[in-house]
Image (cartoon, grey):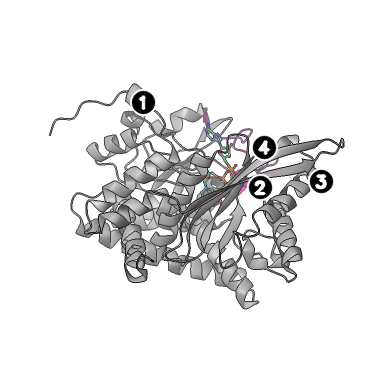
Amino acid sequence: MTTTAPTESDDQPETAAEIARHQLDRAAQYLDIDPGTIERLKHVKSVHQVAIPVQRDNGETEIYTGYRAQHDSARGPFKGGLRYHPDVTAEECTGLSMWMTWKCAVMDIPFGGGKGGVVVNPKELSDTEKERLTRRLAEELRDVVGPMRDIAAPDMGTNAQTMAWFMDAYSMQEGESHPGVVTGKPPVIGGSYGREEAPGRSVAVIAREALDYYDYDISDATVAIQGFGSVGANAARLLDEFGANVVALADVNGAIRDPDGFDTHDVISHEEQPGMVSGYDAPENLPNDELFELDVDVVIPAALGNVLTADNADDVQADLIVEGANGPTTTRADEIFTERDIPVVPDILANAGGVTVSYFEWLQDINRRSWTYEEVNEELENEMLSAWNDVRQSFDSHDEATWREAAYIVGLKRVAEAHNVRGLWP
Ligand code: NAD
C-alpha cells in the first residue's frame, strides 16, 4: 500500500465527535458486531439544551445556554464532566460524551458517557454569580440528572465548589441529600480522597506498565512531560517516585531540562512560582514546543488537545507516547507514529484514573461509607492494572491493531454486549 506523506493542510483539528465516530469505525472492523448497534453508537441518546437566567451582581439578568449530552447508558448511568467555557457547543459535548462511554467501558466501570457545559467565561463572573448560575443549571437539568441517571464532575472552569453547589441545589429540590449526583466534591460532603491526583496517577501507572511491556527498566527510563497542571505534575511526581528520570517538563511559559532527572517535588513546590516550571533554576531552559523533539524514552503530552500533529510527528524522538491530555494526537499524527513504529498509549486508558476514582466516590456516596486515601489508591492501582491487562491482551491478539484500537476494541465489545443482552425495545 502506498501512502502519501501527510501535510498540515489535511491535518485540520477534528471535532471530538468526528474522532469518536472514526475510532468507533476502526474498532468495529475487528469485531463481529450488529451494524445496527454500531450505527446507534454513532448517535447520542439525547442532548439537553437549557436556558439559564442569572441575575448579575449589578441587578441585570443575563441568559446563558447550557447543554448536557448523554451518549449511551447500556452499561449504567451517564457520567461525565461539566465545563464552563465560552467555546462550549452541543457538538463538543456530544463528542466528549462519546469518549466518556469508551473510557468507562475500557475501565469496566458501570457507567455510560455524558458531558455538559455552559457557554460562559467563568472568569467574568463573581463567585456569587457562579453560584446562582450553577444552582439554576442544576434545577434546569434536574429531571435528566441524578445518582442513577447522570452524574456530573468538574471539568474546565468548574471545580469542587461548583459540584457542591450543584449537589446542594439538586438535594434541596429533591427533599433529600443526594451526594451521588456529582463527583469531585469536597470530601466533607462525600467527595473522595485521591480524586484530584487520580488522572496523573493513572498516567504514571500506565506509563510504568508500558515501559515494562517494551522491556525498559523504569530506573533507566527518561521521561518528558508537556503540561505541569493537575495531570502533568502528578504524573511527574509519581514517575519520579517509581524511579524514572523525569528529564524535561514544560508548561505554558516554557520548558526546562535536566539530563540527570529533576527532583519533581522540588519543582512542584519551588518558591518562586509554586506549581510552575518557569522560574525554576534548571540546568537548561528551552521553548516549550521543543519538548517533543527531545530524545527520551517516553513523552507524555498532558496539557492540551491536538498538540501532536502532522507538522511535528516526524520530529518526535521518543520511543513511546503516553497520552495524559484528552485527544493530544491528531489522526494524521497517529498514522505517522504507526508508520514510525512509535506506540501511542491512548488517553481513554492512560488518564482514566479520574473517572475511576469518581466511580469510587459514587460508591462511597451510595453506601454512605468513606474510604481512606490509601484504600482509594490501592483500588485505583488494581483497576488500572486490570484495564491495562485487558488492553494489552487485545493488543497482543490483534496483529494490526494500534494501542488506541486495542483499547477501543475492549470498550466497544463491552458496550455492544450490553446492548445485545438488553435488546432493542420495543
Ligand atoms: P491544568 O489546567 O491543571 O494544567 C494544564 C497545564 O498545561 C498547565 O501546567 C499549563 O501551564 C500547561 N500548558 C498549557 N498550554 C501549554 C503549552 N502550549 N505548552 C506546554 N504546556 C502548556 O489541566 P489538567 O487538569 O492537568 O488537564 C490537562 C489535560 O488533561 C487536559 O487535556 C484535560 O482534559 C485532561 N484531563 C484532565 C483530567 C482531570 O481530572 N484534571 C482528567 C482526564 C484528562
Q: Residue at x 34, y 68 (%)?
A: 423
Which residue is label 1 attached to?
311
Which residue occupies the foreground of this view, 237 or 331? 331
Identity, as a three-letter code, of the amino acid under mark 1? Asp
Identity, as a three-letter code, of the amino acid under mark 3? Thr
Marks 2 & 3, CB-CB < 8 Å contact: no
Is most of the magenta stretch helix, strand or loop? loop
Measured as percent of width and height from the top left, residue 190 is found at 68, 68
Which residue sits furthest left?
Answer: 1
Give whichever of discs 3 and 1 has the lower sequence position.
3
As helix, strand or loop, the secondary structure at mark 4 comes to loop
Give whichever of discs 2 and 3 has the lower sequence position.
3
Q: Please give the range of residues in magenta.
A: 263-285
Which residue occupies the foreground of this view, 378 or 163? 163
Measured as percent of width and height from the top left, residue 72 is found at 44, 58
Q: Is residue 228 above or below residue 152?
A: above
As helix, strand or loop, the secondary structure at mark 1 comes to loop
Marks 3 & 4, CB-CB < 8 Å contact: no
Judged by depth in the image, the label closer to the viewer, 1 or 4, is 4
Give whichever of discs 3 and 4 has the lower sequence position.
4
Alpha-carbon distance for marks 3 and 1? Answer: 44 Å
Identity, as a three-letter code, of the amino acid under mark 2? Thr
Q: Residue at x 46, y 57 (%)?
A: 242
Q: Quadrant of the N terminus?
A: top left
Give whichever of discs 1 and 4 has the lower sequence position.
4
Q: Judge whether residue 267 is colored magenta.
A: yes
Res 158 label: 2
Answer with the quadrant where ligand 1 appears in the image.
top right
Alpha-carbon distance for marks 2 and 3? Answer: 14 Å
Which residue is label 4 attached to?
120
